[in-house]
Image (cartoon, rainbow, N blue to C red):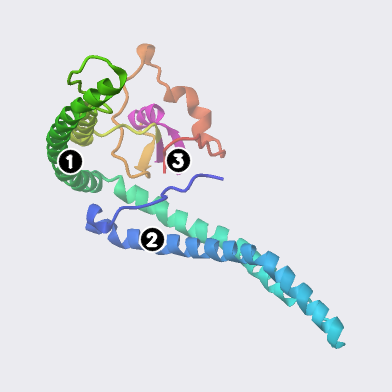
Amino acid sequence: MSLAPITSLPSNTYLPKSAHKLADEWRAAEERVRAIRKAQSEATAALPQALVDDAEALKKAVHDGTPLPDGDHEKRARASIEDSKRRLPIAESERDAIGRRLVVVLRDEAARGHIADTAATTVRASLAAYLEALDDAEQKVTEAHRALAAATAALHIVDALDTGSQLRLLQRPPAGLPSFSAARTAAHQLAQQVDALSERKRPRQRHVRLANGREVHVPASLAADFLRDGQVAEWLDGWPPEKPSVQLAGGTSLASHVEDFRNTPTRFTPRGDAA
């Protein structure tokens, strides 16, 4: 079973307007999947009680001399479970079909840029508030720790009075100061990650329609060879097109070694991140 293309989405605030309708459709489809799973879970959980209820009804019928029941409670529970089992794969398939379309839309350069800019703005604002709170907390904790250490000094006097040791003030705080520098380092690393959002990573796999009409999922480097050789008719995964690869020494190319693959009816779909 292939992995679902989407498992969760941010609010439409993060998404470009062109994707709002499709995103809402995915959320509605996901809600249907959850409702079916909930119904199946509840019916499964109710099955033991249904068996108990049928047993009680059977005993009552025997006691009263009435017609024996036909296990209606169990039948209803099992019917609900089976109904959910039939409906769930259909609902998941519909949701994932919408998800695949949405992923392609969101991979568009402008759509990805909108998400990246919105996320970066939100994270930077939260980071600034976090670092400010960190500075304030460090100051307060440092002052409180200093006061606590000073307060413990007199405890040694009491101990000395009992043990006969030298009377003197000796600070013994229960613990050292926490590391605020480690928290700041982690925050600055997150800031660097946000600053690098504009640097788009290259996909490992590409989904393309070749000039002969076939749809294939291939490594990005092979797709670049196909493009150079005029074999790519359309990019289907939503990512920006590859740049044509450079001809290999001797006039050969990687694409020239896979001619049979391009014309075979077998669809090659390696595991990867292509839509």
The answer to whether any part of residue 185 appears in the image is no
Mark 2 secondary-structure assignment: helix
Q: Position of residue 201 (x, y in %)?
A: 29, 32
Which residues are the magenta region? Answer: 206-229
Which quadrant of the structure image shows residue 156? top left
- Please report the residue visible at 81 percent of the width from the left and 78 percent of the height from the top: 58
Q: Position of residue 91 (x, y in %)?
A: 51, 61
Marks 1 and 2: CB-CB under 8 Å?
Answer: no
Residue 150 appears anywhere in the view: yes
User: What type is the residue that disc 3 sits on?
Assistant: Asn
Amino acid type at mark 2: Arg
Residue at 44% x, 33% y is 218
Question: In the image, which disc is placed on residue 27?
Answer: 2
Q: Position of residue 31 (x, y in %)?
A: 44, 63
Q: Quadrant of residue 54?
A: bottom right
- Residue 47: in magenta span: no
